Amino acid sequence: MRNKYTLLVTAVTILLSQGSVFAQGTPAAKTGKDKSWYDLVNFSGYVDVYYNYTTNNRQGATQDTAGTFHTYNKQFAVNAVKLSAEKLADKESPWGFRLDLQNGQNNMYQERPYQTSNSLHNMQLVQQAYVSFYFPVLKGLTLDVGKMATHIGLEVLDSKDNIAYTIGYVFFNTIPFIHTGARANLQVTDKLSTSLYLYNSAQGTGYTGNGNQFGYNNLTAFGDTSANLAPSLASTQQHAYADGPNPTRAIGTQVKYAFTDNATLVYNTLTANDNIKGRDNNALYYLNNKVGNNGFAQQSTFKTDHWMIQNLIFIFKPIDRLTTIFDYTYGERNGQTNAAAYGYEEPGISRGSFKTATGLSDSQIPSLPDGLVAAGFTDSTSFTRPNSIKRIYQTYQLQAKYEFTEKFALGFRYEYLDDKRYGGILAVNPPLWNVTPADRYDLRFQEALGTRPTPSNLGQIRTITFTPTYNFTENLQVKVDLRRDYGPGNQFVDIHGRPASYQNGIIIGAVAKF
């Protein structure tokens, strides 16, 4: 993210320096070596507001979870207010820092778990805060330590810096937003740079439900609670604000290469295991869950547990006025990481094999669930190597922007999220997945009779967004998103609360920046 902000900071620095020259009538500004450290601190910020209208039955205080950050439907909203202070670390002044203070109605989605308001248990008002070190290695080595925006993904959290106004489904659903950790960026040549990232977790910074990084049990402690640990914020034995539930750290990389001034390729990776225990193997599953093991749960290892992301971005400018970007993301979850992400839960080895291995009688081993028996499973059915089960998702994104004039540009974004092979619940935040609206009594009656299919998510979603952008002045930007979200299955609702396969929306955003 440092690279994404460098251009903005440089522009602000030039404007401020020119302003001081004209105001004071003095000669050229001092060089970096002659300036005091506080003269090198750059200040910037913005105020971002919008009005959103999406064609579903959400409005007012009812949260519209079918979107991303724009959850206030049919309302005016303050998207974000931000104030930044930064001193770049460079050869002439080898230390620095960045501090981003932000508030607004999208803040509750930047830290985990999403949809939590500001409280004593998070640091959402501090979006970024890190210190920087510069080392004269090759073209420059910069080390940042603290809280920082993720390096993964095409889009950023600030809508003014994206082609579209709204955050896309790809960025919102498949990658983290903010990390706490360290990163090192090495500028190898003028065209090639490499980065190494060491984060507390891959899921992102925030409160993690007593170590349950994925949060799929809400505030319930996930793992060994034999020590009577309180699964709530009242626990005095666990930090409410924590990223890494185990000793392992998330490791990320980035390689950026500029073939020409008009063509750049970026390759990002991130790998981690964000669970407090590993996925049970066959024996431990039966020992802990079927037999009970006298109330003591044995912990498995982390050998087969991981979440891995690979992200490829290609930026091409065929002409000065046109920018095109292709973005591809491959995600893979394995072991307990897969289970905690709503993956498959296998019953373990066969009941018969376990009976033979342990010498227990039929009465000492629980019977197969009726659902498995009805599906044709028997005591001899083998469920081997549950740790090898993987959940894979892929996303494809195309963005383009054409600048007609200095004041007017037209942006385009197409997204395709593909999670149909494994799981099928990743795509979007389905607003009523498997749930019928409370006010639709006719639909509930049909469900009671068994005559209405359940709203479904088939693991695929697409979005198309056109974004006219008008620069009212140098400091005031207006964007209009004309957006359509659609896919197979009824994973949306219409204006009357009925299941629908699509939704349309328009959002007008205005950003005053300085």
Image (cartoon, grey):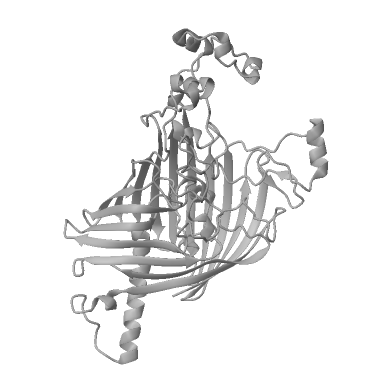
Compared to residue 56, the image places residue 87 above or below, namely below
How many numbered dots are placed on residues in this image? 0
At 67% across and 38% down in the image, what residue appears? 434
The N terminus - image quarter: bottom left
Residue 415, given in percent of the width and then of the height, sits at 53, 47
Compared to residue 411, the image places residue 213 above or below, namely above
| Depth order, front residue of 49/307 | 307
| Depth order, front residue of 384/453 | 384
At 51% across and 60% down in the image, what residue appears? 119
Compared to residue 281, the image places residue 246 above or below, namely below
The C terminus - image quarter: bottom left
Residue 322, given in percent of the width and then of the height, sits at 44, 60
Residue 178, given in percent of the width and then of the height, sits at 42, 54
Residue 116 in sight from this viewpoint? yes
Compared to residue 363, the image places residue 54 above or below, namely below
Q: Is residue 265 left or right of residue 204?
A: left
Residue 406 in sight from this viewpoint? no
At 21% across and 69% down in the image, what residue appears? 93
Residue 5, given in percent of the width and then of the height, sits at 37, 63
